[in-house]
Amino acid sequence: MDLLRRTVCGGLADAGWPEPKFFETTPEDAGRGQATKAMEEGAELIFACGGDGTVMAVVTALADTDVALCVLPAGTGNLLAANLGLSTDAATGVEVALEGGRKRIDVGAVEDQCFAVMAGMGFDAEMLDSTSETAKKRVGSLAYVAGGLKALRRRPMRVRVVLDGGSPMPRRPRAVIVGNVGRLQGGLRLIEDAKPDDGKLDVVILSPNSIGHWLQLGWAVIRRRKRVPRMESFTAERVEIQSNRAQPRQLDGDLIDPGKLMRVHVKPRALLLCVPRPASDPDLAYDASAVEQNAEEVRAAAEEKK
């Protein structure tokens, strides 16, 4: 935490920015209340430092405002940081804010919560639920492999998917994912054509029934093929997923309560996000490597103040 504070405070001070205020999250409030308080005190930009749960809470607070969000990735997973091409180096996140790349992106909404990357019902949420916190602390993102193997034992779901109020589409998938941007951890693109500011959500229905099917699907995703076996893709502004029994659910990699129903709608261009330049590029991670190099001065100054 000391290095983080030195990095943020030092980087901003050297650029002539005012001294920031720090608001710590709690087990009861992952960041939504703190972000709301910061806005009430006049904040124009909020750094969210943490994992998926913290970032999602801050996204929910900042949606439909003119306050910018800058992600400082921490924790085992951070899907929004992965889509920005950011490592766990706080100096790079600070440099992104200082360079001034800003982009308004869509967010998805489920009840009173918003997400910036993707929501899901089924296998993806079950994998998160099957991954222990101890394993994540010990081996990082590799812990999700064990969780995924456990989740493979679940039966396919019985669901009806309704897009924009159309006819129900009955399916027996392993997972239904509603995405705004397309990258998973490690930079892997699940949704190849996802655009963060087109006013649409991308809907992916995954229906592998065997290990062979999973391997075919995974290989096609890795190879970035246009047609992926056992995967259907759609776009919509409103998505309803109805299951015959309660299913695990997640928003931006953070578990929410299981349920039979997930209703998702898009909030067009609701979030002002700090992004690597050029901000106009549809790929949020454009030139992330350059901004990481540019952050060397911020990084070095923080280390010298130890």
Image (cartoon, helix red, strand yellow):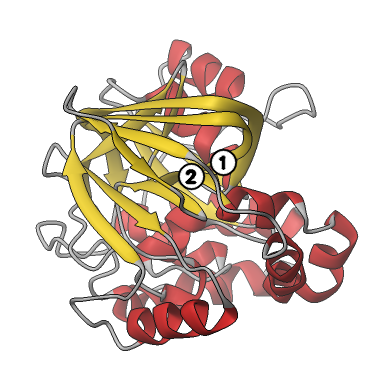
Where residue 112 sits in the image (x, y, percent)?
A: 47, 16
**139 vs 44: above or below:** below
Per the image, label 2 sits on a secondary structure element best described as strand
Front-lying residue, 199 or 125: 125
Instruction: State yes or no: discs 1 and 2 in contact (Cβ < 8 Å).
Output: yes
Q: Which mark is residue 120?
A: 2
Where residue 296 sits in the image (x, y, percent)?
A: 46, 78
Can the viewer see residue 13 in this picture? no
Q: CA distance from mark 1 to mark 2?
A: 5 Å
Q: Residue at x 21, y 65 (%)?
A: 283
Name the residue type under label 1: Gln
Q: Residue at x 60, y 22 (%)?
A: 34
Front-lying residue, 86 or 184: 184
If you read the primary sequence from the N terminus, does the residue marked by circle 1 or circle 2 appear first? Answer: 2
**69 vs 50: above or below:** above
Where, by quadrant of the figure, is residue 60 drawn? Answer: top left
Per the image, label 1 sits on a secondary structure element best described as strand
**176 vs 295: above or below:** above
Front-lying residue, 41 or 165: 165
